[in-house]
Every structure is written in C-alpha cells, then in structure tokens.
Image (cartoon, rainbow, N blue to C red):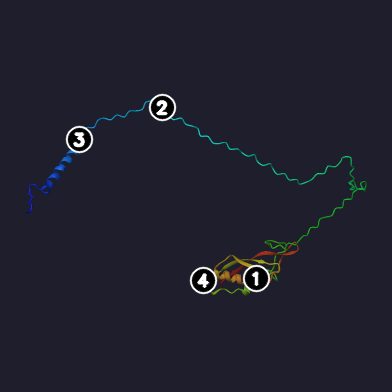
Amino acid sequence: MEAKKSKKAAIENQRGSWLLMGLVVALAFMFVSFEWTQHDVRVAALSSDDESIFVTELVPITFPEEKLEPPPPPETKVTDLFEIVDDTEEVTDNVSVVPDNVNEPYKVVWVPPVVETAEVEEDVIHVSVEIMPEFPGGSAELLKYLSSHIKYPTMSQEMGSQGRVIVQFVVDKDGSITSPTVVRGVDAYLDKEAIRVISGMPKWKPGVQNGKKVRVKYTVPVVFRLQ
C-alpha cells in the first residue's frame, strides 16, 4: 500500500507564508536598528604634557669625510740650458761698433720721390666755356638749315598747332650732337619733328676750355609757324 501524505502536514505548501514572516522580521530588526539612540562620543584632545609621547630625538646625518688627494706637481720643461762661464775668462769681440770714418762729415743726399701722374680724361658736361660751340657758318646758317629741313606734321596742321619747341642737346668733343631732349614742347608731333631735325644736324665746332675741347650743353629753339 502507498503512503499518502496529508495536505496539512506538507511543509512545502506553507513555504510562502514562512518567507513573508521572515521578511517582516528582517524589516523589523532594520527599523529598530535605525531608531536606536546614538550616544555622544567625545574626542579627548591631547594636552601639552602628552606631546612628549610623539617627540622623537632627531639624529643628525653624518657623511664620511672625503680625503682629497693633493694635485699633481706641475710639469716643468727645460727649454734652454745655461752654461755658467767663469768671470775670469776674457771674452773677445771682433765686431767694431764705432766706424773708422767717425770724424768725416756725413753727406745727406735728397732723392725726390717719383710720382706717376696719370692723365684723367674729364667727361664733364659744361654749360659755359671760353669758346662756345658753333654751327658751321654761324647762326644764320643754322636758321637756314632748320627752315629748309623742317617738315610740318599733317596732324599738327589740322589741329592748328604752332609755336616754339625748345630743344637741348650736347655738343661732344668731336662736334657731334648727342642726347637731344625737349625742354619745352608744343605737342607730341611738333616735339618729335624738332628732335628729328636737331639729331640730323652736321657736326658743330666743339667748345674749348683751357685750350682743350670739352663737351658743352647747348639749347636751340625750333619755331613752327603756319602760313
């Protein structure tokens, strides 16, 4: 026959109830522990008499003394050997200090220094010299040359431009004309024509200063006039 257990006698059926009771008891203990009164705690301060407990005697740190070795003696080098000569020995010197002709008068001969002088070619442009440059035949021939060689520009004629163009140039040592520039102009076409005519001039008679031919700056007006 099989043994039958009673439902009331089965402990497993009351497991949930026991678990709840245990949880209630644990919470009760926790609540009691939180509500338990805490006694005052006093911290005793150390008095001046107790400070001696923590005072320790400091022992100074000592290091062993280092023995310094003396520096090595300096090296001495013997460069020259001196020979001790007896003072009793006579030293003869064959060199004569006083010349034989000491009584004769001295003759001082002056030699003039030789100074080499190089001729420096002066490249200075003069404005005024003793003899000024001149067109071949004089001023009258210069006016004839200008009037016969000037070609009046068509654009200047249409615009009615006329006036005097001042041209400045340099008469070189050989009489050639160099560096013509317009000092005062009228318009671009007349200025260009004046430079062309001046540049095409024949060689002039160069200027002279101190008997030498020099470069001289010269100014000539070129007149343009409509008929």
Query: Is 125 rendered above or below residue 197?
Result: above
Residue assigned mark 1: 143
- Going by the numbered disc 4, the residue's amino acid type is Met
Choose top left, top right, bottom left or bottom right for residue 190: bottom right
Residue assigned mark 4: 159
Q: Quadrant of the C terminus?
A: bottom right
Q: Do the residues labelled 4 and 1 touch (CB within 8 Å)?
A: no
Whole-number angstrom distance, CA of label 2 to CA of label 3: 43 Å
Horizontally, residue 225 falls left or right of residue 93, namely left
Residue assigned mark 3: 35
Whole-number angstrom distance, CA of label 4 to CA of label 3: 124 Å
Whole-number angstrom distance, CA of label 4 to CA of label 2: 124 Å
The residue located at (40%, 28%) in the rendering is: 53
Nearer to us in this view, 208 or 151: 208
- Going by the numbered disc 2, the residue's amino acid type is Ser
- Going by the numbered disc 3, the residue's amino acid type is Glu
Residue assigned mark 2: 52
SS type, badge 2: helix
Mark 2 crowdedness (10 Å alpha carbons): few <14, some 14-19, many ≥20: few
Q: In which quarter of the image is the N terminus?
A: bottom left
